[in-house]
């Protein structure tokens, strides 16, 4: 493949080298070793072999395919975009965790009296903890469902920026949903644990 970016591959017709003259020819040699040092060490052997077959052939450049890929501008742009998306994604995840934590902490503070009444009527700290976590899990599931729908829509717009990944890649959506869900539940954990430490008498005297 000559194209390293994009999903549209132009049609090509392969013919024997002897039938079509071309001033420059690319010869790809496949090795059984994935080690880069081993492949680099074979360059001399490849050069000698080609010289033995046809001494008059000019050998301009022999290098591992990895070197070519690293110098390719198209792939460099893809790597840069991937790094930028990763950085922005990490920042977005951090902001999401801080936001969820702030909302749940505020919600627990607003429900201090309610939590105190529940505990005064017999609710134990475990019940209060599960109540806050259950509500956080339901809110997280609802938010993830909306997020997946938005991601499917945005994926069609960003399809040209994805390399060999479909806009609706199930593994990517699954990993992202699991990561966001775990982060959201972790953000709910600390307010829920704080709610279990509410004293019923203190809570009832707050209002």
Image (cartoon, rainbow, N blue to C red):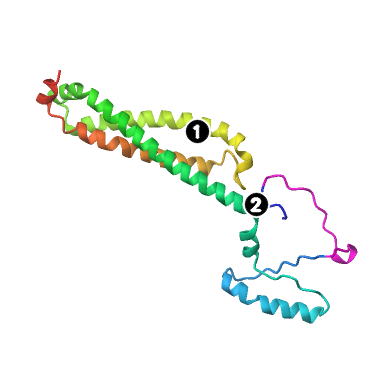
Eyeballing the image, is 115 above or below 73? Answer: above
Q: Is residue 29 left or right of residue 177?
A: right
Q: Is residue 149 left or right of residue 204?
A: right
Which one is nearer the viewer's eye here, 136 or 47?
47
Query: What is the number of the mark on residue 148?
Result: 1
- How many C-alpha atoms fall within 10 Å of the one at disc 2: few (<14), some, or many (≥20)? some
For image coordinates 67% across by 79% down, the residue present is 44
Q: Which residues are magenta?
A: 6-23
Which residue appears farthest toward the right when viewing the image?
19
For image coordinates 52% across by 30% down, the residue present is 149
Residue named by callout 2: 74
Residue 175 visible in the displayed image: no
- How many C-alpha atoms fall within 10 Å of the one at disc 1: few (<14), some, or many (≥20)? some
Q: Is residue 147 left or right of residue 44?
A: left
Eyeballing the image, is 49 above or below 91? Answer: below
Q: Earlier in the sequence, mark 2 or mark 1?
A: 2
Which one is nearer the viewer's eye here, 119 or 21?
21
Give the structural element (helix, strand or loop) at label 2.
Answer: helix
Eyeballing the image, is 37 above or below 142? Answer: below
Residue 46 visible in the displayed image: yes
x and y percent of residue 179 in the render? Answer: 41, 42
Which one is nearer the viewer's eye here, 84 or 10?
84
x and y percent of residue 22 in the render? Answer: 85, 63
x and y percent of residue 159 in the render? Answer: 62, 39
For image coordinates 26% across by 37% down, the residue present is 190
């Amino acid at each position: 493949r000559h194209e390293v970016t994009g999903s549209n591959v132009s049609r090509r017709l392969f013919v024997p080298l002897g039938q079509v003259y071309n001033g420059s020819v690319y010869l790809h040699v496949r090795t059984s070793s994935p080690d880069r040092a081993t492949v680099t060490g074979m360059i001399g052997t490849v050069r000698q072999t080609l010289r033995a077959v046809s001494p008059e052939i000019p050998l301009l450049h022999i290098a591992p395919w990895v070197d070519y890929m690293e110098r390719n501008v198209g792939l460099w742009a893809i790597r840069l975009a991937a790094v930028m998306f990763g950085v922005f994604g990490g920042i977005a995840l951090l902001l999401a965790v801080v936001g969820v934590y702030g909302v749940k902490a505020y919600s627990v503070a607003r429900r201090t009296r309610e939590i105190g009444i529940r505990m005064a009527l017999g609710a134990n700290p475990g019940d209060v903890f599960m109540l806050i976590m259950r509500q956080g899990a339901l809110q997280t599931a609802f938010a993830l469902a909306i997020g997946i729908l938005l991601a499917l829509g945005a994926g069609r717009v960003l399809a040209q920026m994805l390399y060999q990944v479909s806009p609706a890649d199930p593994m990517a959506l699954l990993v992202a949903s699991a990561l966001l869900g775990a982060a959201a539940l972790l953000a709910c954990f600390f307010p829920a644990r704080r709610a279990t430490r509410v004293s019923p008498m203190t809570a009832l005297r707050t209002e």
